[in-house]
Image: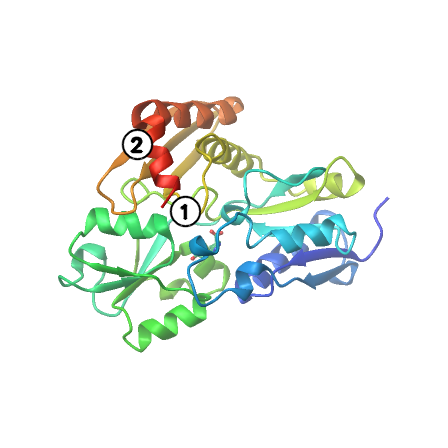
């Protein structure tokens, strides 16, 4: 039994709202319902409140998901819409990811008024990004650049770029596309050389496990994207990824095959351990887990512990 309206919990940023509306519209279409069968419940998360320092310093996982999951647990909402890359590998007891939408562009976008790509930036240019993964990958490619921490939503960052505070910034292409502003990207990075965050470009829907709502939501699950996410989250789970640990990876599905590339990199971009493999899509989780175990064996616990302590 589904009680209407179905309450959809989301953060309140323009991107989060665009994602929640996409989920609502897909559920409405799948179940022959109108928009009035749904209600959007906006939740302010710790990640939204902290705007003055990098979230990696705020510590803890799930800074963009915790209060939303509390709304689910307290029955103030029926389902929660997340960017999969913000969802910690451990979900609260009784919660599950019931569906994912078809993956948007998983790549990172390069945005600049002075160069068409990272390689074209003049020596010593300043690149702003708060993501430790993007910082490390930029330093690896261009050790001569200055990398500064840069926070705020998409609109705030573009304003800082326009004012010339930095010469370039990086954002998920998926976010720009979902906001209807793909033209903001000056260029996009090839994932082979600049691996995205695990789950980047995927919207995940969380519900209580096993109930009618989980089944209602599962109707819009996109199998290939779900398999890719399963592989990427298995990789992250084994490596105990936190926002302090630069970890990257990307899985692609073609027919009944899945391919995965992943890496762990030091924040200065000088040391990295990378691997890739492919296998049957039914083994998506095992493939990601196996890739992570190879990286642990190669890098050694000491290197990984060092990374986690940064
Ligand atoms: N925490 C930031 C965040 N979480 C998800 C996205 C982009 C959308 C996506 O990956 O689906 C972003 C912004 C960015 O990285 O530019």
Q: Tell me what residue is drawn at x 31 percent, y 78 percent.
A: 163
Q: CA distance from mark 2 to mark 1?
A: 18 Å
Residue 227 lies, with reference to residue 112, above or below; the image says: above
Between disc 2 and disc 1, whose residue precedes?
Answer: 1
Q: Position of residue 251 (x, y in %)?
A: 43, 35
Residue 71 higher or lower than 97, as above or below: below
Q: Indicate which disc residue 274 carries.
A: 2
Q: Secondary structure at mark 2?
A: strand
Q: Quarter of the image containing the N terminus? A: top right
Q: Position of residue 11 (x, y in %)?
A: 60, 61
Most foreground residue, 178 or 155: 155
Image x and y of residue 109, in percent: 35, 56
Find disc 1 in the rendering and name its residue: 244
Q: Secondary structure at mark 1?
A: loop
Numbered label attached to residue 300 = none
Would residue 189 be seen by someone viewing this image from the given angle?
A: no
Of residues 157 and 69, which is closer to you in this image? 69
Say whether residue 42 is left or right of residue 158.
right
């Amino acid at each position: 039994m589904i009680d209407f309206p179905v309450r959809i919990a989301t953060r309140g940023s323009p991107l989060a709202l665009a994602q929640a509306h996409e989920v609502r519209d897909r559920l409405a279409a799948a179940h022959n319902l109108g928009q009035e069968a749904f209600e959007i419940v906006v939740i302010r998360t710790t990640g939204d409140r902290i705007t003055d320092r990098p979230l990696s310093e705020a510590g803890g996982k799930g800074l963009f998901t915790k209060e939303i999951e509390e709304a689910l647990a307290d029955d103030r909402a029926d389902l929660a819409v997340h960017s999969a890359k913000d969802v910690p590998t451990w979900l609260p007891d009784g919660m599950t990811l019931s569906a994912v939408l078809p993956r948007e562009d998983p790549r990172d976008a390069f945005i600049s008024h002075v160069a068409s790509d990272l390689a074209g930036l003049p020596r010593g240019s300043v690149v702003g990004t708060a993501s430790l993964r993007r910082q490390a990958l930029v330093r690896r490619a261009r050790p001569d650049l200055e990398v500064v921490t840069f926070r705020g939503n998409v609109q705030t960052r573009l304003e800082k770029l326009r004012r010339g505070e930095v010469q370039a910034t990086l954002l998920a292409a998926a976010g720009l596309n979902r906001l209807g502003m793909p033209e903001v990207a000056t260029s996009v990075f090839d994932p082979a050389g600049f691996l995205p965050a695990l789950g980047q470009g995927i919207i995940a829907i969380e519900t209580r496990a096993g109930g009618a709502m989980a089944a209602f939501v599962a109707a819009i699950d996109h199998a290939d994207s779900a398999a890719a996410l399963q592989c990427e989250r298995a990789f992250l789970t084994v490596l105990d990824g936190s926002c302090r640990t630069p970890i990257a990876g990307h899985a692609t599905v073609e027919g009944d095959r899945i391919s995965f590339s992943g890496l762990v990199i030091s924040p200065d971009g000088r040391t990295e351990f990378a691997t890739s493999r492919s296998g049957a899509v039914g083994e998506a989780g095992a493939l990601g887990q196996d890739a992570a175990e190879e990286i642990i064996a190669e890098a050694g616990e000491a290197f990984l512990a060092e990374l986690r302590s940064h």
